């Protein structure tokens, strides 16, 4: 009996000696989903794949594509089965984004823009239009599309106030905002309209074309919200930070927005150090909602150490009836395979986290 009492006393001491669990640690565990499609690997080895953008085909959404950067060589265009359609060996292209409806040469075109780090001392924006027939890309960058410094993270924005198109370049510890315009020769020119300092290196960004915000990931700090209009100045709000004070585990990488209609939806961030994807309310306060992991399945390996991400709410055929989430993956099960991108049905993510499914078209990109 005495021996039993001593054992109970020891166990009690062990229980009460345990450090208290923080509020962040006490939050529910991440939910898990799996990828139903993975793309063919990018052509280059090592840390090469980086950032995806989803292009919606104008008449048949099942023919939509994923445009992914190979930062050692160019841009890869994949179909929704993950097959490589075409590869553009145009340089060290890092981040990519797109917008529809840009007026160029008397036509409404889809612009695809990537940051080009081939010459990091100058940096430039690689600018393309999508050919909707071939689903390939056509170079429309003006010869003077240089940034005067490193080109790193990038996202696009169409102002709901003026209709003007912009590209944000995140590099050299600052956020640069560049206006995009038709130069009258069938090419897209750029003009710097704003520069806002960051305290350290940023990369991921996404702009909300409906609400007029741009979100920037400062890799070792957290996620900032800025006004996206060129006259909004340098004021910004920290919506979440890295550990120990916030939910994120450095580095903060890709950012994207899922549109659930009427200004509602979700901001999603790649929390690279935790192999997780963090979900926040789109409005009004960007409150944290939860996180998910992409785990291994019979058709795809797990997704880890993700850089860039993208999402759409558009129905893309039977495989993705309520939209798709795309994430860069750091490693494949077979170490001889190069990096690639994974596609996850939004239906699975929404079900796991009890999120809304959007109904109003692809946020901010339908021009």
Image (cartoon, rainbow, N blue to C red):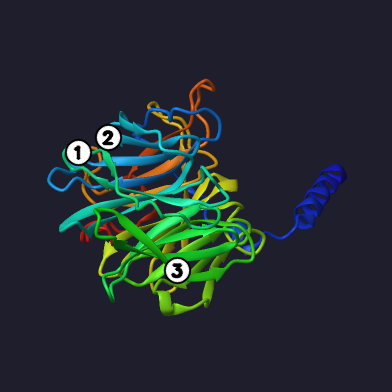
Q: Is residue 145 left or right of residue 6?
A: left
Tell me residue 126's x, y (percent): 39, 48
Q: Nearer the viewer, residue 242 or 127?
A: 127
**N-terminal label among 1 and 3:** 1
Tell me residue 105's x, y (percent): 19, 56
Q: Residue at x 26, y 38 (%)?
A: 136
Q: Which residue is mark 1?
A: 63
Q: Nearer the viewer, mark 2 or mark 3?
A: 2
Q: Which residue is mark 2?
A: 79
- Mark 3: which secondary structure? loop
Q: Quadrant of the N terminus?
A: top right
Mark pair 1, 3: CA separation: 33 Å
Q: Nearer the viewer, mark 1 or mark 3?
A: 1
Q: Are marks 1 and 2 in contact (CB under 8 Å)?
A: yes
Q: Which mark is residue 351?
A: none
Answer above or below: position of 5 versus 304: below
Q: Which residue is mark 3?
A: 286
- The image quadrant of residue 345 is top left
Q: Residue at x 59, y 56 (%)?
A: 219
**N-terminal label among 2 and 3:** 2
Residue 17, can we see it?
A: yes
């Amino acid at each position: 009996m005495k021996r039993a009492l001593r054992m109970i006393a020891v166990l009690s001491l062990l229980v009460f000696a345990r450090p208290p669990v923080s509020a962040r640690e006490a939050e529910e565990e991440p939910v898990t989903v799996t990828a139903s499609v993975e793309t063919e690997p990018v052509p280059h080895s090592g840390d090469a794949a980086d950032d995806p953008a989803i292009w919606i085909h104008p008449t048949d959404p099942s023919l939509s594509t994923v445009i992914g950067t190979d930062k050692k060589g160019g841009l890869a265009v994949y179909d929704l089965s993950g097959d490589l359609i075409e590869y553009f060996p145009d340089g060290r292209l890092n981040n990519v984004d797109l917008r529809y409806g840009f007026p160029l040469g008397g036509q409404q075109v889809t612009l695809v823009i990537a940051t080009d780090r081939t010459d990091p001392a100058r940096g430039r924006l690689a600018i393309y239009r999508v050919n909707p027939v071939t689903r390939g890309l056509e170079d429309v960058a003006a010869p003077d599309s240089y940034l005067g410094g490193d080109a790193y993270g990038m996202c696009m924005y169409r102002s709901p106030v003026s209709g003007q198109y912009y590209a944000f370049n995140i590099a050299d510890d600052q956020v640069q905002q560049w206006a995009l315009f038709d130069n009258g020769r069938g090419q897209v020119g750029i003009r710097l309209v704003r520069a806002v300092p960051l305290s350290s290196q940023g990369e991921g960004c996404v702009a909300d074309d409906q609400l007029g915000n741009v979100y920037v990931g400062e890799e070792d700090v957290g996620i900032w919200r800025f006004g996206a209009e060129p006259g909004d100045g340098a004021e910004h709000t920290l919506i979440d930070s890295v550990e120990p004070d916030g939910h994120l585990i450095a580095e903060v990488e890709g950012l994207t927005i899922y549109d659930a209609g009427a200004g509602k939806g979700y901001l999603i961030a790649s929390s690279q150090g935790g192999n997780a994807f963090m979900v926040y309310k789109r409005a009004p306060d960007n409150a944290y909602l939860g996180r998910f992991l992409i785990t291994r399945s019979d058709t795809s390996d797990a997704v880890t150490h993700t850089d860039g991400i993208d999402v759409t709410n558009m129905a893309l055929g039977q495989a993705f009836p309520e939209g798709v989430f795309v994430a860069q993956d750091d490693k494949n099960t077979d170490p001889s395979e190069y990096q690639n991108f994974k596609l996850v049905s939004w239906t699975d993510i929404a079900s796991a986290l009890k999120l809304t499914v959007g109904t109003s078209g692809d946020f901010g990109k339908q021009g």
